[in-house]
Amino acid sequence: MSLNPGDLESIGGYALVDRLGSGGMGVVYLGHSDSGRRVAVKVIHAQYAQDEEFRTRFRQEVAAARRVSGAFTAPVVDADPDAEQPWMATLYVPGRTLSDIVSKEGPLRGRELRTLALGLVEALRDIHRVGVVHRDLKPSNVLMAEDGPRVIDFGISHAVDNQALTVTGRLIGTPPFMSPEQFAAPRDVTAASDVFSLGSLLVYAATGNRPFDGASPYLTGYQVMYEAPVLDGVAEPLRSIAERCLDKDPAARPSLAELQGLFRALPDSGGISGEADVRTSVPPAGREGGPAETSRPVSPARPVPPGTPTAPGEGGTDGTRAGRRPRGRRVLVGLLAALAVAGLSFVAVNIASSDDAPQPSTAPEKASAPASASPSAVTLPPKHVPWDYQIGGTYPLPTGVRVVSRDHGDAPAPGAYNICNINAFQVQQGAEGDWDSDLLLRDAGGDVVHDKDWDEAVLDIRTGAKRQRIAAEVNAWIDDCAEKGFKAVEPDNYDSFTRFPKYLTADQAKAFMKLLVAHAHEKGLAVAQKNTAELLAYRASVGLDFAVVEECGRWDECGAFAEAFDNNVFVVEYTAKGMSKACSGWGSTLSVVRRDQDVVAEGSDGYLRRTC
């Protein structure tokens, strides 16, 4: 592309003749020296030249790039990180980026794919040999030269003797190609992180789709950390290699030496599904990763590494909750909620393409009424009124209570807005025989997958056909709620996918919930989102009307739910500390009650109820 008005015409003695690309930190130009030598010149944006943190980062980039030399990287020719406008020149490599080639011409086949894989292994070997971790290996940072790929852009690389910089309030990287540890502990990544990114990149090169591809960077990050990769269309033996590279546990990923041997054995002919070695002229769906929101099939994956906290569910009888326990949390879940509230963004400081990093919205999606119902079709509960949570046993409403949630097997309370609690995503203890066997989620050995904390079988919502059949059963309970006079329904265990990421995905949960919402709205019932902060961005598209949230004070999620549901949020806390935080922060805005962990009826042993 040609120079833009206002672009520099020269810097450091190099004439700048063309723009090659631009990104978060700067612009890359095609330049040449007086002798005619062509170089790629990266010039930092003027506004960042005054930012000492960015300037320090650029110095580190220059130092890292200077340390790396090899046939599959672009060597540094010249640089001045201390100039008024810092710049760095590398040897110009004629060639298009991998992202450009795949998006316009389709996935690589046979020998092209093998050459790419081997070249990237050699590039990473050269990078790691000098103690550098690239941290941003992705299709737009790979140039496809005639004699093999080149890895470029060390803008967020990390050397063991560097300062550990992270831009304040932001995660650095490109979510679809980041490793789990880049989200969990960005200062402590090792060379194994680049192996994970290599696995994602090769899946993209072979299929045109990313193995982790959420509708927002927040959801993509969640998928990277907890969900199995989508490897549809990746043929053996590359599929098995990619699975190992994408292991959540860095220690379980193959070494570069092992990968080199495995890639040498890849066939020189044949495509991703056994077709002839011919590049299709039809680009893959979507840009560098396909559609943003799909029903993600499940591929085998190792469990989350030991030590990762889990988020246990709740349990009861007869399709609803008859008791509960405190929710454990995954590290990222709280992070996602915090990012949604604060409006923080992932930032990818790269120069080749901005297409790798989809831009998140700064707040969860909101709508005054869901698309599946007209505003008059359902009645929403009143906001910020005294309420009670009676899913473990009913008793007369305390004075002033205007909203109550009860088990669907119980009768609604006269004179109040009643919410009907149903267990929608798991099977109640002892009720497995009431379900068709094939609707119970099973592991690779054919055994039913259970929420062991409550001995509840998990329902298999992985396909559209099964979701329809399961919804038919659950919708019968919704019909019962409507007939009894409840005004809303609270489908519990929407967050089951967070506890069973080896099998279930967020997209499957959303698709199933949409079926329940549509039916409830037809019956005139509003629908509450139960917990699941990681899906707040989809509140309106799924059709959810308000929220019932457990322990949002304890886990600092109340603000995220308040923003997403315009303060129509009903909070139940189970600890004194959580109650104190909820009341001090949100008692004047949201409906808050503290209950005992088993939510037993008044007069029973352990009964507790407090309000702000």
Image (cartoon, helix red, strand yellow):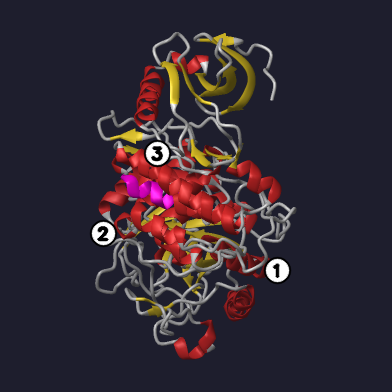
Asked whether residue 191 is drawn in magenta, I would say: yes
Q: Residue at x 74, y 54 (%)?
A: 282
Q: Residue at x 68, y 54 (%)?
A: 284
Q: Residue at x 52, y 59 (%)?
A: 529
Above-or-below relation of 254 to 504: above
Q: Relative to the observer, which residue lies in front, 581 or 7? A: 7
The type of residue carrying mark 1 is: Glu
Residue at image mark 2: 307
Residue at image mark 1: 522
Q: Which residues are magenta?
A: 190-197
At which x and y percent is residue 447? 41, 84
Could you say which disc has been placed on residue 286 in the image?
none
Q: Residues within 10 Å of mark 2 (few under 14, many from 20)?
A: few
| Inter-mark Cα distance, 1 to 3 | 53 Å
Q: Earlier in the sequence, mark 2 or mark 1?
A: 2
Quarter of the rendering containing residue 598: bottom left
| Inter-mark Cα distance, 2 to 1 | 44 Å
The type of residue carrying mark 3 is: His
At which x and y percent is residue 438? 53, 85
| Inter-mark Cα distance, 3 to 2 | 27 Å
Q: Residues within 10 Å of mark 3 (few under 14, many from 20)?
A: many
Any part of residue 476 in sight? yes
Tag in front: 1 or 3: 3
Q: Earlier in the sequence, mark 3 or mark 2?
A: 3
Q: Residues within 10 Å of mark 1 (few under 14, many from 20)?
A: some
Q: Quadrant of the N terminus?
A: top right
